[in-house]
Amino acid sequence: MISENQAPQNLHKNESIKSASNFLRGTILEGLSDLTSGDISADDSQLTKFHGIYLQDDRDVRSERRKQKLDKAYSFMARVGIPGGVCNAEQWIVMDNLSRDYSNGTLKLTTRQAFQLHGIIKSNLKHSIRVINDALMTTLCACGDVNRNVMCNPNPHLSSVHADAQATAEAISKHLMPATRAYHEIWLDEKKVAESGGEEVEPIYGKTYLPRKFKIAVAVPPSNDVDVFAHCLGFIAIVESDKIVGYNVSVGGGLGMTHGNEATFPRLADVIAFCTPEQAVDVAEKIVTIQRDHGDRSNRAHARFKYTVEDKGADWIRSELERRIGYTLENPRKFLFESNGDRYGWHQGQDGNWHLNLFVEGGRVIDLPDFPLKTGLRKIAEIHTGEFRLTANQNLIIANITPEQKPAIEVLVSEYKLNPGEHVSGLRRNSIACVALPTCGLALAESERYLPKLIDELETVIEEAGLRNDDITIRSTGCPNGCGRPYLGEIGLVGKAPGKYNLYLGAGFAGERLNKLYRASVKNTELKDLLAPIIRDYAQKRKDGERFGEFVIREGYVQATNAGNEFHHNVAG
Ligand code: SRM
Ligand code: SF4
């Protein structure tokens, strides 16, 4: 029996767009060849998301152009998903070239270990996508109602453990890629399936794909840098004698919500079972099919897997999973996360190779007059034989540097003033800001362009309070969708309107607890004064080892949020 939210008459319009799209083709090809306008049709712009491509416009000039009766300044954002954030030096150079030649001159390292190129105009789009594919990367499934870029802890200091975790992330990613050849036909000029007499099937997704986006992460305790509990599906590595013996499986995390709609809320995942490394791909596939069959296809604000888990219960999900895989899973094993931040600076792996975790503010790789970050990284790429690894905190690891190569890289780090995080305050090095304005069509307020300025102001407070080197997580977003995972910041800022933010406090430092609203609609000019006394209070009264997020709860600034469904409420007692 199909449920009400799957009944044909109740389906959201995106379901019919997907269904009529002929496996994600729509009229994208025709739209691309029409160069009389810079955009594509509304339906196609839903479909290009599955191809990792968003139609955007420059919001800085939107009102001026409206006054002048001009079209919006359209361009495209392309997102390149690389499982676990791992790419090689040649691939970095390809991305660097594309950003210089066809986009806005910058690279954005995202909170899901992907690259974003902003500002590609329509006539350059196809060529850019082809260049990305020629370099053995893809934009396919970086967005859309499918499984997205699979995240994984990228710091290979425990070389063999990380190699195994990465292999799991890559295997899941590969297995959950859609089968449609639409992408190859449209962007890579492959022969049309219809012409070659073939017939298409989507064995995992079916022709309407998932009700909504789906996200997976692999975490390696004690680091929760990937924020595994914010994911639809998580795999938490259980390590014994330097070997991954299996994964705890977590389900039902997700952060997006809508201001003023309490039926929407961020939710952290429940840990439901333990699986062996060999079972992980099967578990991932079957969880995806549970969401395919039971997710809400009528209301996109209730369509994420977190609501399926919330409504049906974690126990039901586990038994349905076991029914679908055909065997029983073990109960979860013990694990401990210590932080959801990055390990900055130089670290040597078990195999003797070195890894340098650099701080990249807001994930924006750009050349500034006094800080030529982009050129510095390119120079490194020109000599580096290891990898570039994008972190879930929008930072970058130059990974697998041989001991012989280390001195040459050190010279470049110092010549280009690259930042291994040592001179940065504990607040700044634990900051995340989503893109927001001017490219994000959903932004209600600034984020990436604002957070560094707020941190400048707050640094005067933390300096005076003697907290310069203390790690405190601060995360901001320009709207409640949660792209910078703000509900997992000890301090979280969520855009409400231009210059106004909801201020949240009290998340767990290891990403184990959501924060809680402290003040709504605070003007940006008032944020420093609102936070300063709390920061000073923390400096004076904190207990040994007590984190800022714990302190604000103990001192009663906010109540603890122990479950997503109490995010909007204070609980009596
Ligand atoms: Fe996100 C939509 C940027 C991570 C939740 N996100 C968007 C769009 C595409 C806006 C749009 O739909 O038009 C943003 C593009 C802005 C731009 O100009 O580039 C955007 N999201 C980002 C990135 C680039 C933020 C960043 O600064 O790093 C991150 C790209 C990740 C990637 O590489 O795949 C990004 N987005 C996230 C995360 C964090 C995560 O996944 O760990 C979340 C919260 C976790 C979650 O999904 O629950 C997130 N993005 C959303 C949502 C809300 C989803 C929901 O459940 O309600 C939207 C809007 C939507 O889907 O309707 C959204
Ligand atoms: Fe845009 Fe909102 Fe995501 Fe920020 S959180 S990138 S403003 S959708």
Image (spheres, rainbow, N blue to C red):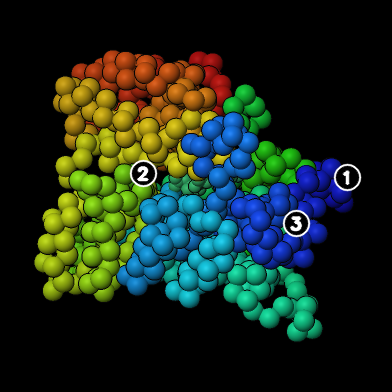
- The residue shown at (77%, 65%) is 22
Q: Circle 1: is it few (<14), some (14-19), or many (20+) Cα within 10 Å?
A: few
Disc 3 residue type?
Answer: Lys
Q: Circle 3: is it few (<14), some (14-19), or many (20+) Cα within 10 Å?
A: many
Residue 306 horizontal side relative to residue 211, left or right: left
Residue 352 horizontal side relative to residue 178, left or right: left
Q: Position of residue 462 (x, y in %)?
A: 22, 26
Can the viewer see residue 234? no
**Residues marked 3 and 2 touching at CB (< 8 Å):** no
Residue sitting nearer the eye, 15 or 334: 15
Label of residue 362 in the image: 2
Which of marks 2 and 3 precedes in the sequence? 3
- The answer to whether 234 is drawn above or below residue 70 in the figure is below
- The residue shown at (27%, 67%) is 381
Label of residue 9 in the image: 1
Q: CA distance from mark 1 to mark 3?
A: 15 Å
Quarter occupied by residue 144: bottom right
Quarter occupied by residue 508: top left
Residue sitting nearer the eye, 514 or 51: 51
